[in-house]
Every structure is written in C-alpha cells, then in structure tokens.
Amino acid sequence: MSPTDAAVIRTTTAPRQRWEATDLGLIAVFAALVAGSALVPGIPANAFGIPITFQTLAVMLTGLMLGAGRGFAAVGLYTLLGLAGLPIFSSGRSGLGILAGPSAGYIIAFPIAAAVVGWLAAITIRRAGGARAVWLFVAAMVTSILVVHTLGIAGIAVNTKAPLGQAFVADLVFYPGDVIKNILAAVIAVALHRAFPDLLVRRARRGGK
C-alpha cells in the first residue's frame, strides 16, 4: 500500500465535522461542474426526445468525489437553480415545467444518485485497495441502474402515459453511454483522490473540535 493510499484510508475512518467554508466551496464548484456539463449539446436518443448528455458523468463524479452529503447538496443546488429558472438543464431548458416532461425522472434522480454513489464511494475508498477504480465503477453502475434508470423510466411512464414496457425499452438506449461515462467517472475519481486524499472525507480537527 502506497503512502497516498494509506492517507486515503485514514481520512475515511476519521469522523466528519460540520461543513466549513471549504465544503461550501466544493459544493458550489461541483454544482457549477454539473451545470457546465449541460452546456455540451445532447443527442436525442429515443422516441421521447430525451437526450444523451454529459450530466450523468458529472453527477456521478460529484458523488464519488464529495461523498453522500456534499454530493447531494451540490447536485441538489444545481437542480433547484434549474427549476427556479436558470437555463442550466440540457439544451438550455429550465423551470418547473421540466417536471411535466419525459426527462423529469432523470432530473429528480440526479441528487439522489449523487448521494447514493457518494455513500458507496466512502465505503469503497476504505476497503477496495488496489481495485479501487473497479469498485468505484461498480458503485456508479449500481447507482445508475437502481436510481437514475428506475426513476427515469417512471418519469417517462407517468408524464407521457406510455406503457411501462415502452418506457423501459426507451431507457435501454442510455446504457452503453452510461457504461462509458461511469468508467470515466471512476478513473477520474481515483486520480483526484490520489492527488487530494482529504477530499472525500477530510481529516478531523485535532483536539476534537
């Protein structure tokens, strides 16, 4: 085990403190990252016009880097700002009207997915050892399937009145891209964790404060 790996393990076993300025700054930075990922034009991928975007890559990376709480806060901030009217969803969309469209389930899933994959990342970083990238990828894929795709299918079915089977088939087109994006998220996360071993769970202050 390298010194950097040992440092990562030490940080993940230390108790978390309340959020400070650094945490709030990271939340803002990663919220901006998710918003920036939506600037890349999406590719409409199914009969309902839901595009393939880089947003899921940014969402997963946020959770893998910040953990459950801060990851949820960062992606939740992005989502709230978009629903409030800032044109930061894919194709410059915004507003509460998004929740009546076919992509509503995916947008609702984003903050939840960041929290779930962040929680899994904290466990993985502590236990995975040299296979960390593989397990982070597994964490991201499990989260994608259970959270993003499940809520995405539900959103399609509810808002378009399509049969559940049709919504499921429409969602399948996103799987190949998600595999690639989750691989990228895991590789980037491992590199960043090695460079910044305190990022996921920062060291507790000395003196118990």
Image (cartoon, grey):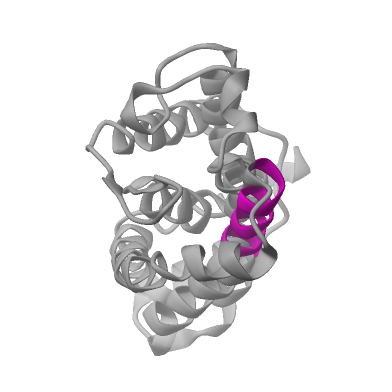
Please state the horizontal and vertical placement of residue 158, each as a whole percent of the image.
Answer: 71, 47
The image quadrant that residue 124 belongs to is: bottom right
| 154 is within the stretch colored magenta | yes
In the displayed structure, would residue 22 be above or below residue 207? above
Magenta stretch: dominant secondary structure? helix
Q: At which x and y percent is residue 60?
A: 46, 56
State left or right for residue 161 relative to residue 1: right
Q: Quadrant of the C terminus?
A: top right
Residue at 67% x, 53% y is: 157
For this orientation, the residue located farthest to the right is: 208
Residue extending farthest top: 85
* Image location of residue 207, percent across then percent down: 73, 43
Towards the viewer: 171 or 35 = 171
Instruction: Classify 75 as above or below 85.
Output: below
Picture quarter containing residue 163? Answer: bottom right
* Residue 121 appears in view: no
Residue that appears at 63% across and 73% down: 123
First to last magenta residue range: 147-159
- Which residue is located at x 55 percent, y 35 percent? 74
**Snapshot quadrant of residue 95:** top right
The reply, left or right, for residue 113 in relation to residue 207 is left
**Residue in the foreground of this view, choosing between 93 and 28:** 93
176 in the magenta segment: no
Q: From the viewer's side, name the closer residue of 48 and 135.
A: 48
Tell me residue 118's x, y (percent): 59, 58
State left or right for residue 26 relative to residue 91. Answer: right
Work out whether residue 128 or residue 13 is closer to the camera in this orientation and state it: 128
